């Protein structure tokens, strides 16, 4: 039976990954610092089922400050998902938080793994490292040009993974997630904000003309790609994890209205600094190496998030 360390275990993707691992018979050590970026109650709700599961151990700790040797001792692999998220909040003095949570934490965790024999160290990166997709779909060898401090911090994390592979032989794998959505999505993310507003009859804030597009990835598909990266990912490889569900924001808003049975009310505003115009993933490399094949279409994924939110708002 394998034992895995999952950082960011109380988060959106992390908690779903932990459940996938436990369901597959693995033991999981989950860590999270409960960053104040959003409410602790959301993260506690994410952990509710896991805390009752056999084979799951949870530790509240700060990867940037606390000793890490004990949490990596005896594990077979590391899924490093913990990070300070959010493009728009990464400007100004707040960037120091991103440096601690996205870079210092990653470096300290890699350092702690130097003397461990790991199947792999899987690092959750982001499509934000690319900046605008001027020509798509974007392949992993595209020159990265992040347009936000957040994107810079995630790219720096990738470089840390590579140098610890090159110098110390750690089997690192980096995954560039493209706009993950679904049940347990963070409250600051657009889909959850829009669906919540629709349920409550409030207007949504749309920045720009709505013709910006994203490659949307359902959380279960992202989790499966992450799991397979541990099993099959090549050393020092980087993979795009995208859902193949590219749509404009206007198309998404219309689809949400169809699912909820009433058009969403909109307030339009200016484009925000750091927002990219388009993202579009070429996932052929992940398909070849990881057998990655997204299964959930955008309509079904949005409906699942909508139904989860209905249950969440009733509590």
Image: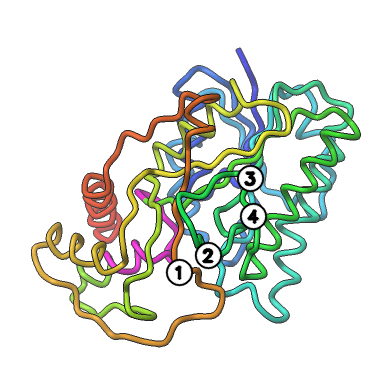
Q: Which residue is mark 2?
A: 132
> Could you tell me residue 309's position as x and y percent?
28, 56
Kindly identify which numbered label has been placed on residue 141. 3
Q: Which residue is rendered at x = 34% and y = 68% of the image?
A: 193
Q: Give yes or no for contact between labels 3 and 2 (Cβ–Cβ under 8 Å).
A: no
Q: Earlier in the sequence, mark 3 or mark 2?
A: 2
* 68 in relation to 19, above or below: below
Placement of the C terminus among the 4 image quadrants: bottom left
Q: Residues within 10 Å of mark 2 (few under 14, many from 20)?
A: many
Local secondary structure at mark 3: loop
> Could you tell me residue 217's position as x and y percent?
40, 46
Q: Earlier in the sequence, mark 2 or mark 1?
A: 2
Q: Which residue is mark 1?
A: 277
Query: Left or right: 134 with respect to 32?
Result: left
Local secondary structure at mark 1: loop
Q: Which residue is rendered at x = 15% and y = 65% of the image?
A: 257
CA–CA distance in space, label 3 to label 2:
15 Å
Residue, far top: 1
Q: Which residue is mark 4?
A: 83
> Could you tell me residue 246's position as x and y percent?
34, 53
């Amino acid at each position: 039976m394998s034992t895995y360390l999952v950082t960011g275990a109380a988060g959106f993707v992390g908690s779903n990954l932990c459940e996938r691992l436990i369901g597959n018979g693995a033991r999981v050590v989950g860590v999270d610092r409960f960053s104040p970026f959003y409410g602790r109650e959301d993260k506690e709700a994410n952990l509710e089922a896991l805390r009752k599961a056999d084979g799951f151990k949870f530790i509240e700790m700060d990867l940037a400050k606390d000793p890490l040797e004990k949490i990596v001792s005896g594990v077979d692999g590391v899924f490093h998902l913990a990070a300070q998220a959010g493009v728009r909040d990464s400007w100004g003095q707040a960037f120091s938080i991103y440096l601690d949570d996205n870079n210092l934490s990653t470096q300290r965790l890699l350092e702690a793994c130097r003397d461990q024999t790991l199947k792999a160290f899987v690092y959750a990166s982001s499509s934000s490292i690319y900046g605008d997709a001027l020509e798509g779909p974007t392949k992993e060898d595209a020159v990265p040009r992040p347009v936000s401090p957040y994107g810079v911090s995630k790219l720096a994390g990738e470089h840390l993974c590579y140098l610890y592979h090159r110098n110390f032989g750690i089997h690192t794998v980096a995954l560039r997630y493209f706009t993950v959505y679904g049940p347990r999505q963070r409250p600051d993310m657009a889909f959850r904000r829009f669906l919540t507003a629709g349920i409550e009859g409030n207007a949504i804030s749309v920045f720009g003309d709505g013709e910006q597009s994203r490659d949307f990835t359902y959380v279960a598909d992202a989790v499966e790609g992450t799991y397979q990266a541990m099993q099959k990912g090549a050393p020092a490889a980087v993979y795009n994890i995208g859902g193949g569900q590219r749509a404009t924001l206007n198309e998404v808003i219309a689809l949400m209205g169809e699912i909820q049975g009433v058009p969403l009310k909109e307030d339009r505003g200016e484009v925000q600094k750091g927002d990219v115009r388009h993202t579009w993933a070429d996932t052929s490399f992940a398909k070849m190496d990881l057998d990655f094949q997204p299964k959930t279409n955008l309509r079904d994924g949005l409906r699942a998030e909508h139904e989860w939110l209905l249950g969440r708002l009733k509590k």
